[in-house]
Amino acid sequence: MWQNNEETRGPDGKLNIGSRPLAGDDIFGMLTELNVQCLALLAEQALRPTPPTPPMFRELVDLWSQLDPASRRRAAACPYLLMDAGFCDPYRWQWLSDQHASARSGVADTLRAPLIFGKFFTAPSLVQVARQLFTHSWHIAQSQPLRAPLFLGMPGHCVALLRTCSMMQLTDLAEQHAGWLRPRWPGRPKIWRKLLEAGISGDPDELERARLHGVQLLAMELKALERLKGLGLAPRWACLVCMS
């Protein structure tokens, strides 16, 4: 479990993630950079001319408009990814893994892609963010397989499937299925309000509480998914748990 203390936190409340590399890679720094891009995409979507309908946009439009580069980076310094990309759905990653196996064996690809249930984002930068998210998530799964579930909000069996994919597949996936991207907890604006307000104010204690709340929520979701998997129900209910 991620922990923080005074030695790993700067005066502005931002994690000193550069001082804590894992296995030769600054995973926390990578997560922050990804989250900066994700927050920029979310702000772009929230402020588009078409009135946004999700509560996290509709109720928090004033906060999204206040995010400047400094506050965005403070909010982004979480030890987990703020965006989901169907990470809890084993069907998607089994499909991608099977595609890779078929390509290696020379068997013609006859597998159908999983269905997409509507596109959350219409902002132009979606595909660019998707490229970064898929390829860096793959890197995290490769370099930190035991910690990747909490970093990505992705059950262990899905992490294992992601690790079998090729980098080329992940690049193609971003081009063809960028619509998989969703923010975490889109129907729970209070979670986002706390994170955005803490990022804007720079209050170290509020930032700490917002980050820890996210860690606790992800840990509970992953525990619920593992329990459902044990009951043979994970494929049916996984997406519902992750979208809560």
Image (cartoon, rainbow, N blue to C red):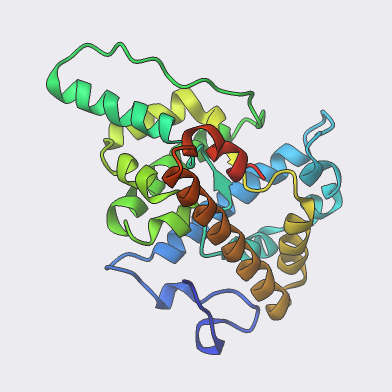
Give the vertical position of 178 relative to 7 (above or below): above
Q: Nearer the viewer, residue 115 or 70?
A: 115
Could you say where residue 218 lies in the image, as x and y percent from the top left? 56, 57
In this picture, residue 189 sits left or right of residue 179:
right
Q: Kindly indicate the quadrant of the structure image that contains residue 146.
A: bottom left
In this picture, residue 59 sits left or right of residue 151:
right
Confirm whether residue 67 shows in the render.
Answer: no
Please tell me which residue is depicted at 78% across the width and 64% down the height of the picture: 197
Confirm whether residue 72 shows in the render.
Answer: yes
In this picture, residue 116 sits left or right of residue 166:
right
Q: Which of 204 and 71 is in front in this view?
A: 204
Q: Nearer the viewer, residue 24 or 235?
A: 235
Could you say where residue 163 lies in the image, as x and y percent from the top left? 29, 44
Give the vertical position of 48 relative to 35 (above or below): above
Give the vertical position of 129 relative to 144 (above or below): above
In the rendered view of the protein, which quadrant contains the C terminus? top right
Q: Kindly indicate the quadrant of the structure image that contains residue 148.
A: bottom left
Q: Residue furthest bottom?
A: 6
Q: Which residue lies furthest to the left in this view?
A: 105
